[in-house]
Amino acid sequence: MTPQLVAKLIHDFDSSGIHRIGSAGDYLSGQWLQHELQNETLTLHRQTVSFKKTQVKEAYLECAGLRIEALPLFDSPSTGVNGIEGTLAPAQTGLKGQIGFARFPPNAASIKGQALEQLRQNTPLSALVIATDSNDQSLAPINAQHYHHPLGPPILQVAGFHAPFLTEQAKRSAHAKLVSQSDLIDCESYNLSVKLECPRIALAAPVVVLTPRTGWWESTAERAGGIVAWMASVKIASQLHHVAKLKRDFYAYATCGHELGHLGLETLIKSHPHLVTEAHYWLHLGANLGCAANLDLFIRTGEIDMAHTLRRLLIEENYPEAHIHIEPLAKISGEGFDLNRLGARVLSVAGSNPYFHSTSDRWPGNVSTQAVAAIARASARWVQLQNES
């Protein structure tokens, strides 16, 4: 996997548009991925994922004569047509009947149980408005971990640049009105999967490689690095299978709905419940792999030897050693968190991105092709090693 090929792949992914589940870019990027990999010896299968798509009708906050357009937190309830009125107050100290204001980063719901979730569960406030913190101070939506069961009061998200104004208005107990109206409509997306089975299994437990493929906007550095590394892993497994050297079954999944409580993984687990614990190992290719704005890479697993194996492979493939960090399993996030909670052996790799969930997360400025290529080559070599162990 060369930087030149990586550049083409990421350019094409970025060009397919906004990749939010159920959007045109979701379907186009899925078609692109199938086109890039599918050939006479390899077939990608689609697994339908049915869900209720949030169609926003109105979402805004009125305060001190200003109307601020917003986006609902997709796992919070609507307000109804008349909205909610009250005085604006700091969310941590607000009282019953008030509208709370707070600032949170876009990864505030990367796993369940974080500070935002605790606030939502315990607040007496009638509603909340959140300014999302990102480097460009744009609207960087927070994932909807409780998409099936809306939690807490109605919540709107606004761009970070509104934070100084709203902070001041909360100090003044200014009057505010919050409106959040959405419809839920039936919709479908899909997971993409590859299954390569040994004609005669020598090492019974399969290797599984998983990466999410959807996100709030184009989400280029967030998602593309993982997708390219996933493609490299699939290609090496396909080559081993083609020459009858695949010793373990190999499964790969590119799942949809990461931003809505990992809907694709949920559907996958329901259809293959035994795979979670029966797999030899899951390689979770998480978010922000090869982000140019921050090359820090985090390896998380319960088995330290496996973490050091992947670290060695990354270094050998010229990933900058100073940016590779091994962290405890307790810090695992995303789909890796869900798999670990269900008892899977997981090796998770994720990065950092100052433009996380932001419209500024685009090609070419926020992606390092050298870094993505190194991660892709290391991932493919990891698959080869597991095939021999």
Image (cartoon, helix red, strand yellow):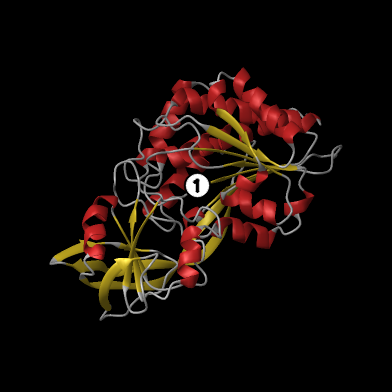
Picture coordinates of residue 136, whole percent (x, y): 29, 42
Q: Which residue is mark 1?
A: 213
Q: Nearer the viewer, residue 372 or 24?
A: 372
Quarter in which the N terminus is drawn = top right
Figure check: 294 above or below 68: above
Q: Residues within 10 Å of mark 1 (few under 14, many from 20)?
A: many
Figure check: 260 above or below 337: below
Q: Nearer the viewer, residue 239 or 316?
A: 316
376 left or right of 20 in image: right
Q: Is residue 291 visible?
A: yes
Picture coordinates of residue 280, whole percent (x, y): 77, 43
Query: Which residue is drawn at the image coordinates 42% and 58% (left, top)?
Result: 22
Query: Which residue is drawn at the image coordinates 26% and 77% (left, top)?
Result: 86
Picture coordinates of residue 261, whole percent (x, y): 52, 60
Picture coordinates of residue 226, whole percent (x, y): 53, 38
78 left or right of 30 in image: left
